[in-house]
Amino acid sequence: MTSPEQARPEPLAAPPAIGRHLAARVSALGDRLIRLLETRGVGEPTILIGFAALIGVIVGSGILVFYYMIDQASAVAGVVTRWIGDLSGFYALGIVLVLALGLTLVLVIVSILTDGSPGENIPDVMHAVARRGGVIHSLPVFVKTVGAAATIGAGGSVGAEGPVAVLGAALASRAGRFVRFSARRLRVMVGCGAAAGIAGAFGAPLAGVFFALEKLLGESRTTSLAPVVVSCAAAAAVTRNGMGSVPVIAIPRGYGVQEPKDLVLYAVIGLLSGLLAVIYSRTVWRTQDLFSRWKPWVRVAVASVAIGAVASQFEPSLWASGHQRLNLGLVTGTAAWALIAMAFAKLFATAFTFAGGGVGGVFTPALVIGGTFGAGIAATVNLLFPGINLEPIPSGLVGMAAVVSGSMHAPLTAVFMVLEMTNDYGLVLPLLLGSALALVVARSIYPESIYSEWLVRRGEHLSGGMDQMVLGQLTVREAVRRDRPRLSTVTTLDDAITRVSDSGLQLFPVVDSEAVLVGMVGWEKMLQSAREMPGAGSTLIVDLMEPVTEVVALDDTLLTALRRIGLRDVSLIPVIDHPDRRQLIGVISRADVLRSYDREVSG
């Protein structure tokens, strides 16, 4: 996430001659490697899985380096904060000044080294997969990864998962372009890199897989799924080996559904969390809109003071920072009002961090917001109805999954993230219920997620996954079959059966003398009429046809065509030149749509 300025940055300057020469040498080596593998009989799935495993290892190693950078930045920030606090007698002053220095540093390096680019975030990766064939420039991503370490280390309220997901995508894109992968292969590799970033950051390989499928690739074919799974497993293995396998979310014991009434209360948490998720995403963007009108130093000053004031009032160990583990056990015994206040405090601190120029992810803040909010709802219920005794920790876990689901429109990612981060699978049903309800509420209030909002502000609408993105770009003109049989209103039943018996189709358009579409007739109806009607052979097709229920025009998208085919559950629909003239051009079927889709994604 970055500031909301609308203008896209100018294209990066061409690399120096020495850089181009090195890239050409590496690409030549990559070409030879791919040719060698293909001559040895190694198929595409094996090549993709091998590269996916390599990407997973590289991304996992990159995460460890990134976390080391955060640790070093946090250590320096801690020393300076304590020094300022001891010197002035006000610890909060140290928090404010250190954060101001960190945000200023980020603004400077982003402005100078990336020309103030608003991209290099997860929505930008979504855009690269859908529109740019998986091409992501590496330098701006590396710069913003350093900026994220500075933001987090200085005390900014952002997560580490977003930067490492983008870093993974950029590394995968660069590696794929070195070996000259096609656009289709490159898209898959970028999905592997981003998913590996999520999997390694949270130690949650399944969450990484579902993140790639829900937010990036939008499809689950074997050629995409297997590499993503391998990449996530490799990245999680590397980070777990480097940081240990202790659960990211610390809970005192395992939990489950004790009574059926608990599910009703968890459903309420899911519904309320869906509302909170919209408040979260809208606040993040509205705050950036407000701050974008101010000068940079004013943004930094206001953000630092606001975040410092909030941070000084709440327990940092519950919030967590950077890649630290969240201790949800601390919600036990905390007053309901304090938990609800903490959720909103984290929400506003995150919004101010981004608005002040900070760089980072939105997952971890969403987890903290949802955890404290869910626990606060449980504490409120227990206060008002002492006999219910709803446990705050499992309620917090449901709140976590629900806020992530509602704000990012990724319910399965949210569920598996919480399950894997706690190693507690006893709450699968409440998590699924809460996430699903939160998504329904969030979408009914506002259709965009915290990610797709960034894209919408730039004129892009990619919230439906890659399948819908691709189909929304292609038109019926590219898939229409003009050679399919058509019948005339004056054609007899015998002649019609003779003409279309070998076509293998189930529906046929009927046209008048000027080729205007007037109806449709089915193969089964023609056969049934021939068997049951006396003298049926001379019956005119016009007497057997039925009204046309769905049509598409040449300039309609394939997504529109597929939806209209599915709406009536028919095998094909007619294609006309114009809704007013209705002159028949041809027909289009599901197979025609999918054939055009495959050609497009195969690049």
Image (cartoon, helix red, strand yellow):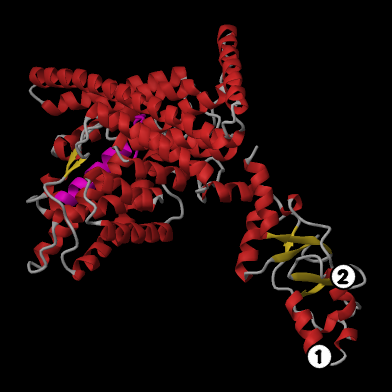
- Please tell me which residue is depicted at 15% across the width and 18% down the height of the picture: 79
Q: Residue tagged by mark 1?
A: 533
Specify start and end residues of the magenta stretch as a single range: 339-362
- Please tell me which residue is depicted at 36% across the width and 59% down the height of the picture: 436
- In the displayed structure, 587 sits above or below 507; it is above
Q: Does residue 128 appear to the left or right of 527 in the view shown?
A: left
Q: Does residue 414 appear to the left or right of 392 in the view shown?
A: right
**Residue 455 drawn at (x, y percent):** 51, 42
Question: Quick check: is 558 in the magenta stretch?
Answer: no
- In the displayed structure, 572 sits above or below 301; it is below
**Which quarter of the picture shows residue 530?**
bottom right
Question: Quick check: is 360 in the magenta stretch?
Answer: yes
Q: Residue tagged by mark 2?
A: 499
Q: If the image is split into quadrants, where does the C terminus sit? A: top right
Mark 1 Cα within 10 Å, few/some/many (few <14, many 20+)? few
Q: Does residue 44 appear to the left or right of 244 in the view shown?
A: right
> How far is the residue under mark 1 from the one under mark 2?
20 Å
Element assignment for label 1: loop
**Which quarter of the picture shows residue 441?**
bottom left
**Which quarter of the picture shows residue 306?**
top left
- Please tell me which residue is depicted at 45% across the width and 51% down the height of the picture: 448
